[in-house]
Amino acid sequence: MHSMLPQNCLLCGTFSGRAKLCADCAADLPYHPQACCPVCALPTLNGAICGHCLKRPPHFGSTRAAYTYAFPLDRLVQSLKYRHNLAVVSLLADTLATQAASHPLPDALIPMPLHPNRLRQRGFNQAHEIARHIARILRLPVLPHAATRIIDTAPQASLPLNERRKNLRGAFVCDHTLQGKRVAIVDDVLTSGSTLDALAGALLKAGALEVQCWVAARAVMQRNF
C-alpha cells in the first residue's frame, strides 16, 4: 500500500505521504470477514459452508476475498475499471496476496478474460493487472491466455439473477492444457458468482484438478451459479 514517492490519497485526495490512502480512508476500508463460506466467501455464522453451496456446489472449490464490495472500496474498484486508475491495482493485489498466502497456493493464476471487444474499449484487463501484481509477490506463474471469452455477453449487472447463468452459457473456452494443475481465477469483484462458475467449468474441462477464486472484493448478495 506504499509508494516510493509522496502522493495524495486515492480516495479523498489529501496528502498521504508514501501511502496509497490517508489514515482515515484506510481505516474505512471494508475488509472481508474471516467468518464466511469457504466456497463462495458469503459471510456465514462461524465460517460454515452456506446452504446454497451445499445444495448446488459451484465448479470452483474455494474463494479468497480481500474486501467486501462496499463504500468506499467500491469507488476504488470503479476508478480502476472505468478511469484507468492503475494505482489502485497494488492496493487491491497486496491485500489479496496476503489473504491468499495463508492458504495452500495454486500452481498458476488465471485472470478473468475479457471479450476482445470489451478489451479494445477498456484498453486493459483489470483482472490481469491484479493477477500480475499478485504473481510477483507470491512467485506464481500467470496464464493470461489459458482461457478465452468467445461470447461478448451483456453485462451481468444489467441482468436479473435468474438470467445470469443463461447469459454465460458457452462464453468461455480453454485450449490450454491444465491437466492435473491447481489454478486460481483472479478477478476484481465477485457478485453473483455466475461468471466465475462458468469459467471454472471451462477450466475443469481442460483438465484442471482444482479451481480456486481470488477476488479483490466480494459483493454480499444472492448467488446464481
Image (tube, rainbow, N blue to C red):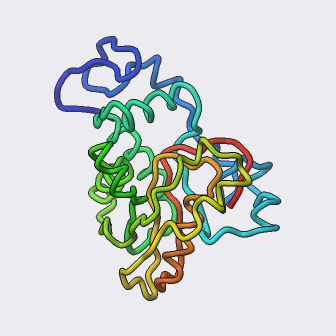
Q: How many labels does the image show?
A: 0
Nearer to us in this view, 9 or 171: 171
Of the 4 image quadrants, the one containing the C terminus is: bottom right
Q: Is residue 74 above or below residue 153?
A: above
Q: Residue at x 62, y 72 (%)?
A: 59
Of residues 186 and 198, the one drawn nearer to the viewer in this rendering: 198
Residue 224 located left or right of residue 79 = right
Q: Which residue is situated farthest in the top direction here?
A: 14
Where's the N terminus, which quadrant? top left
Residue 52 image point, x, y percent: 79, 60
Q: Which of 44 and 170 is in front in this view?
A: 170
Q: Percent position (x, y) of residue 117?
A: 35, 52
Vertical side of 21 occupied by 202: above or below = below
Of residues 104 and 144, the one nearer the viewer is 144
Please give the name of the residue rendered at 65% of the width and 60% of the height, measured from the top-left corner: 165
Left or right: residue 177 versus residue 54 is left
Q: Write the residue at 30% across / 69% down.
A: 141
User: Within the image, what quadrant is residue 19 found in?
Assistant: top left
Residue 101: percent from the left, percent from the top?
45, 59
Residue displayed at 59% across by 31% down = 70
Question: Residue 163, how many percent across, how many down?
Answer: 69, 54
Instruction: From the viewer's perspective, tell me whether residue 209 is left or right of residue 49.
Output: left
